Image (cartoon, grey):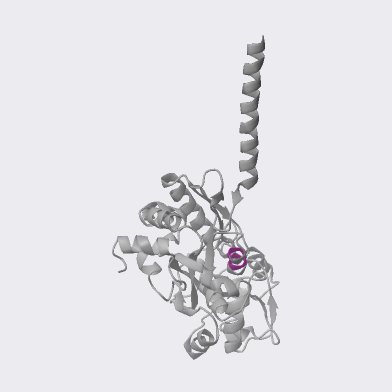
Amino acid sequence: MKRKFKFLSIIMAVLTLLLLAACGNKEEAGTSSSGKEKGGLNDIFLGNVTTGSNTAESYAFAAGIANIVQKEHPNVQLTVQTSGGGTENLSRLAAGEAQLGVLYSPNIDAAKAGEGNGADKINEMKGIFAWDYAAFNLIVKADSGIKTVEDLKGKSIAVGAPGSTGAVYVWPSVLPEFGITEKNSDWKYLTQSAAATALADGSVDAITAGSKGKISAIEELSLSHDLLWLELGGEKRENAIKIGHGMFATEGDPNLYGDKQVNDKPIPTVGMSAVFAVRADVDEEVVYNITKSLFENLETFYESHSSAKEVTIESTLNPELMRLDLHPGAEKYFKEIGAIK
């Protein structure tokens, strides 16, 4: 009986020690701003990816990347988050609330100039890949009588969601060059869906959009209304690009919405790029694996969105599109394949 009691005592002591050790590990566990798990399994990367709305191109891109990477590297776990866009994404990255995210060239260039939330942290952001993201569009009903941007004086214009890149950095630089200001017209801050509904019911006279691909809200609007894209070209466009942040000259597609889009030639306007960014403190090997998984599985990635084919090695290494320094992990991959020296 004494031997049995002694044996049970030893078992209980061992279990107690194991329990205490487990509790200690649990208290030390957590996730750092770099996404690496502290304590326990140190080789697991838990990364938040901040994007846009759940219907946005950036969200689809990130979801596609997360799926590709996790299949090849199960220890790299990316959680895709919705957000209000580039301005919010930069704030989250700067605060360490996200490890990766989509930033837009106007936000990046404005931050480099010391403007906006997260500007003091912009040098801590690095790039993985970049692409030609958007042609900015100014859209009216074809039968509205509005033919030029100057015709919008005294009209109501939906310039984008509050805090969005378009509303903060693009249209305040572009529209005044064409004589349209908040004083001589009515600027409304609406989401894309709300703006399309407002144009349909006559609550606004014009809406804005930023995309090279189709936008579902505008596509739905085009089912019941013929639409006209206004031209934003010439010297006024060049002046807007000079005074603004992160924009460049580009053209909109006159055939994007078929016969419901009445433009008969490419539409001069301004564009911006997008950068899939990452905090500089994210482990080099993690970023290397993400970069390699993406570029070795581009055909799979291209299935994630109609605009995904804009992402190429060439677009990434184009300094007009890539406004950040490459992360060392991404640089390692591009050197490995001979894309850079």
Q: Can residue 212 be seen in this view?
A: no
Percent x, y for residue 91? Answer: 62, 67
Vertical side of 111 occupied by 151: above or below? below
Residue 319 appears in the rendering = yes
Callout count: 0
209 falls in the magenta region: no
Which residue is at 66% across, 11% downward?
Answer: 2
Q: Which of 335 and 15 is in front in this view?
A: 15
Direction from residue 23 to residue 113 in the image, left or right: left
Residue 248, x across and y down, in percent: 47, 79
Residue found at the far top of this picture: 1
The spot of residue 41 in percent (x, y) is 52, 44
Q: Give the range drawn in magenta.
A: 89-93
Across and down, in percent, residue 266 comes to: 44, 76
Quadrant of the snapshot with the N terminus:
top right
Is 52 in front, or is 271? Answer: 52
